[in-house]
């Protein structure tokens, strides 16, 4: 199983980035996918998750209204559109997969750095 996260970069506060997670080596359509982030000196936190069908979505309170998660099962990809970025969004962002319906997130990508300057 491989998860490849991409799309990170340096952006000014108020700007936007779109992260992508490309999966291979698994039956993508039976996996829930999540985006997580870890900032320096902080614990990893869940940012957004989407279930196998796309019908159930969760957002952390800190990103509600600014981030949008979506998936295309035909392309084995999940995206995270991030708008109105804030300096506190700076972190390494990881995508992870969990076997539906209630499996643990045990497949992780390598992470992509997002840096938001003030």
Image (cartoon, rainbow, N blue to C red):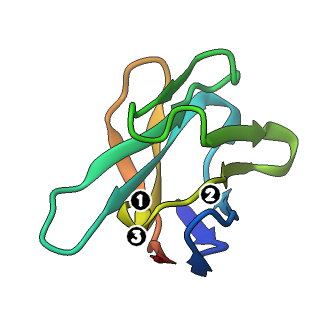
Out of 28 and 39, give the one closest to the viewer: 39
- Distance between mark 1 and mark 3 Cα atoms: 19 Å
Please identify, in this view, whether the residue under mark 1 or under mark 3 is nearer the observer. 3
What is the x, y in percent for residue 61?
A: 39, 31
Sequence-earlier tag: 2 or 3: 2
Sequence-earlier tag: 2 or 1: 2
Instruction: Name the residue: 60% across, 43% down.
Output: 67
Tags 1 and 3 in contact by the CB under 8 Å rule? no
Instruction: Name the residue: 27% across, 68% down.
Output: 39
Please identify, in this view, whether the residue under mark 2 or under mark 3 is nearer the observer. 3
Question: Would you say 95 lies left or right of 23 here?
Answer: left
What kind of element bears circle 2? Answer: loop
Using the image, determine if residue 87 lies above or below residue 65: below
Query: Which mark, by number, is residue 90?
Result: 3
Residue picked out by circle 2: 25
Using the image, determine if residue 59 lies above or below residue 7: above
Query: Which mark, by number, is residue 108?
Result: 1
Q: Residue furthest right?
A: 74
What is the x, y in percent for residue 46?
A: 35, 43
Instruction: Name the residue: 52% across, 32% down.
Output: 64
Q: Residues within 10 Å of mark 1 (few under 14, many from 20)?
A: many
Query: Which mark, by number, is residue 51?
Result: none
């Amino acid at each position: 199983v491989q998860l490849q996260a991409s799309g990170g970069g340096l952006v000014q506060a108020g700007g936007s980035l779109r992260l992508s997670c490309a999966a291979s080596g698994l039956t993508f359509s039976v996996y829930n996918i999540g985006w997580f982030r870890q900032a320096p000196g902080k614990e990893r936190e869940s940012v957004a998750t989407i279930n196998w069908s796309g019908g159930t979505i969760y957002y952390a309170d800190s990103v509600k209204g600014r981030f949008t998660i979506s998936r295309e099962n035909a392309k084995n990809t999940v995206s995270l559109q991030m708008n109105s970025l804030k300096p506190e969004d700076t972190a390494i962002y990881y995508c992870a997969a969990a076997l539906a319906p209630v499996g643990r997130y045990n497949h992780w990508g390598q992470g992509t750095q997002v840096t938001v300057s003030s």
